[in-house]
């Protein structure tokens, strides 16, 4: 094999112990190449240099213990009907009982006489020490002991078919074979300035640290590199866009006041402030790049419409892109209502989604091309080749986290350096804004319109579901509408979940047979889904069974109650978005969760959700629990590249890296100077879609 070949080009199958068969297992972890494996870092570490004897374990703490398997027994719980496996570990000082639920296959591993390592929270039950559902490993061979005992041990994310032992062994073999082919891309002066490890030492100490200070220094080194190159990409992108000529939109003070005073309700101070920020940006002859974040119900759409009206007053077109047909149609209906009521004067609006086809689509696209339409509201259909604008100068992208950065760029290409406003209802702490949206200015709607009802949230265990349904029936009798939300559509044999379709049928025939019950989910055709939502909105459906299609932007003021089943299966941000669908009128809302939080993470999530309705507090807590990568999803630009760097916990490193990136891009925004060309190549390789403008420049 060619030693100069890039590690990203060498398949994982060539690592000792993998081969073609196990290659597929690694692909499930997102590992395709040798480079992927070397950058697949532990999620935590266990100090197994001096393990605590069972007799000295501390109740209430998470600890690691090793011992010989004395015996095991399985049974069915008479109360919950769950399968229970109990394994007794012993060492020279005592006994520990480890208990697992609904995992009968574990019997095959816990054979008497074998040695096991377990990590979990230590409890006392009936005068005996126990751990519930601990992480576990069986230690067998001598080689196993060298990597898995007597040292600081890495603990990796796993998938079916991979054990910690096998993963450590494979990564160790990969380091032995390939670490000398690692290329250090961070400039030497920067490494020296901040006393950072070279990449070979950094990667080895990240996987198999000699000490915790070594592990911290390794993480600092790798995090600095990731932050540095991503911040260069973010800053260079901003400069490549904002240094181009854009459209100067003017709006007289009297016209701005007429817009603000033209509604039958008073705008919040935050809305008025953000309208001023957008007006200032749009008056410049360079493109606006602004992120507008505001909690559910804070009035983002009205603020965005100000930009659309401003563009129209200056003779230009605008568009609003939403992630779903339901949300796009809702925006269109709300804006049409404002136009009919005279709040937006003579603005000409149209709706373009995947449901618009054939002759109807041809006619609409012709009107957009000719400039007969001022504002087009739509979905991904706006990016299609047929959707050409006469003079697009203002773009709104709603729910940015649902779109990739390349989609945003494709839409921008429909105009000539248009102003761009990105909207998100996912509250983002400042540190993440710097990291992810450093190419944008930030506006925040931090207050809700007055007169809204409060939403009370309660959590019930599975065995009290009937109590929840009884509460829902009481609310239905009072004339209120109810959502019941499920995480999946069809019943699955592998998951013990009540599915939307199954429960819809049960509710219709049994629990809610006296009421009108509807079902909406993501697999319905757009037209069907819209018809059901319209029926619910118009009061022709009393109770709507739904999947997370509800998560974004549905506005039904009469819907005051939401039941969320299997609440532990939802992310915290997702729960917050769902809850935002109720309490939109003057009456208080009621959010009833049914769930069993079996993991520490899900317990923390549900506790945080019940304790506050403040979106920013929830976002902060969500980040603490899950970290930014899982918070935004793998497709979010930048975060899928930040394999170690965490802007939430490493703000000091982020700010140093951003400082260096700012200095470099300020002096050479297109990365054209001789000393920066290598950096430009690295950036373009790591962020091919993110730096299209710089690459072209």
Image (spheres, rainbow, N blue to C red):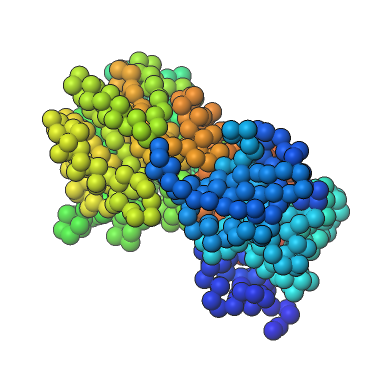
Give the vertical position of 578 relative to 471 (above or below).
below
Report the residue that reaches farthest toward the bottom: 1
Image-based side of 539 in relation to 265, left or right = left
Image-based side of 277 in relation to 45, left or right = left
Report the residue at 69% width, 49% height from top. 90
Image location (x, y in percent) of residue 70: 65, 53
Task: Say which of 329 and 72 sits in front.
Answer: 72
- Snapshot quadrant of residue 674: bottom right
Look at the image and tell me in which quarter the C terminus lies: bottom right
The answer to whether residue 367 of the structure is visible from this angle is no
- Snapshot quadrant of residue 267: top left
Task: Say which of 51 and 403 sits in front.
Answer: 51
Task: Say which of 16 and 274 sits in front.
Answer: 16
Report the residue at 59% width, 78% height from top. 19
Image location (x, y in percent) of residue 230: 64, 52
Image location (x, y in percent) of residue 678: 72, 65
């Amino acid at each position: 094999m060619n030693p100069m070949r890039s590690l990203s080009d060498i398949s994982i199958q060539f690592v000792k112990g993998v081969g073609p068969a196990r290659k597929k297992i690694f692909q499930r972890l997102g590992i395709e190449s040798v480079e992927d494996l070397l950058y697949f870092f532990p999620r935590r570490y266990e100090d197994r240099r001096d393990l605590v004897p069972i007799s000295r374990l501390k109740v209430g703490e998470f600890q690691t213990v090793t011992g010989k398997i004395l015996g095991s027994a399985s049974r069915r719980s008479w109360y919950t009907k769950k399968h229970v496996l109990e394994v007794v570990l012993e060492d020279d000082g005592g006994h520990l009982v480890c208990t697992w639920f609904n995992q009968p296959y574990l019997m095959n591993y816990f054979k008497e006489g074998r040695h096991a390592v377990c990590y979990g929270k230590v409890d006392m039950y009936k005068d005996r020490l126990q751990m519930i559902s601990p992480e576990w490993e069986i230690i067998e061979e001598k080689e196993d002991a060298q990597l898995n005992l007597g040292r600081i041990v890495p603990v990796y994310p796993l998938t079916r078919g991979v054990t910690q032992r096998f993963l450590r062994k494979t990564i160790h073999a990969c380091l032995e074979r390939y670490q000398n082919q690692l290329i250090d891309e961070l400039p030497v002066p920067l490494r020296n300035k901040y006393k950072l490890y070279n990449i070979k030492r950094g990667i080895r100490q990240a996987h198999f640290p000699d000490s915790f200070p070594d592990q911290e220094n390794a993480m600092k080194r790798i995090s600095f590199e990731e932050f540095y190159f991503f911040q260069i990409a973010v800053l260079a992108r901003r400069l490549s866009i904002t240094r181009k000529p854009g459209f100067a939109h003017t709006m007289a003070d009297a016209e701005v006041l007429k817009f603000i005073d033209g509604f039958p309700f008073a705008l919040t101070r935050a809305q008025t402030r953000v309208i001023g920020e957008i007006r200032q940006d749009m008056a410049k002859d360079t493109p606006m790049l602004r992120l507008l974040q505001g909690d559910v119900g804070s009035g983002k759409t009205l603020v965005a419409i100000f930009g659309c009206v401003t563009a129209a007053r200056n003779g230009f077109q605008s568009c609003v892109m939403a992630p779903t047909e339901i949300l796009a149609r809702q925006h269109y209906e709300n804006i049409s209502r404002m136009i009919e009521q005279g709040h937006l004067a003579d603005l000409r609006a149209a709706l373009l989604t995947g449901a618009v086809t054939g002759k109807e689509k041809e006619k609409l696209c012709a009107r957009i091309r000719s400039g007969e339409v001022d504002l087009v509201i739509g979905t991904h259909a706006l990016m299609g080749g047929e959707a050409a604008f006469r003079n697009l100068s203002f773009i709104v992208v709603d729910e940015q986290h649902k779109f990739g950065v390349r989609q945003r760029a494709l839409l921008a290409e429909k105009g000539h350096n248009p102003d761009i406003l990105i909207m998100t209802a996912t509250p983002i702490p400042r540190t993440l804004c710097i990291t992810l949206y450093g190419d944008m200015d930030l506006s925040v709607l931090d207050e809700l319109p007055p007169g809204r009802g409060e939403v009370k949230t309660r959590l019930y265990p599975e065995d009290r579901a009937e109590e929840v349904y009884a509460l829902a029936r009481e609310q239905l009798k009072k004339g209120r509408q109810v959502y019941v939300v499920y995480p999946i559509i069809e019943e699955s044999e592998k998951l013990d979940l009540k599915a939307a379709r199954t429960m819809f049928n049960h509710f219709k025939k049994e629990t809610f047979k006296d009421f009108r019950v509807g079902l909406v989910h993501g697999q319905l055709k757009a037209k069907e889904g819209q018809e059901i939502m319209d029926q619910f909105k118009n009061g022709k459906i009393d109770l709507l069974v739904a999947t997370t299609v509800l998560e974004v932007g549905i506005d039904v003021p009469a819907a005051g109650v939401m039941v969320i089943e299997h609440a532990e299966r939802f992310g915290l941000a997702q729960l917050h978005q769902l809850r935002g669908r109720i309490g939109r009128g003057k009456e208080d809302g009621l959010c009833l969760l049914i769930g069993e939080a079996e993991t520490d993470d899900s317990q923390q999530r549900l506790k945080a959700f019940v304790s506050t309705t403040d979106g920013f507090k929830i976002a902060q807590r969500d980040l603490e629990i899950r970290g930014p990568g899982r918070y935004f999803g793998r497709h979010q630009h930048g975060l899928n590249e930040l394999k170690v760097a965490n802007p939430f916990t490493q703000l000091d490193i982020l700010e140093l890296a951003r400082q260096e990136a700012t200095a470099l891009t300020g002096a050479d925004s297109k990365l054209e100077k001789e000393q920066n060309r290598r950096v430009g190549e690295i950036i373009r390789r790591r962020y091919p879609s993110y730096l299209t403008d710089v690459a072209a420049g």
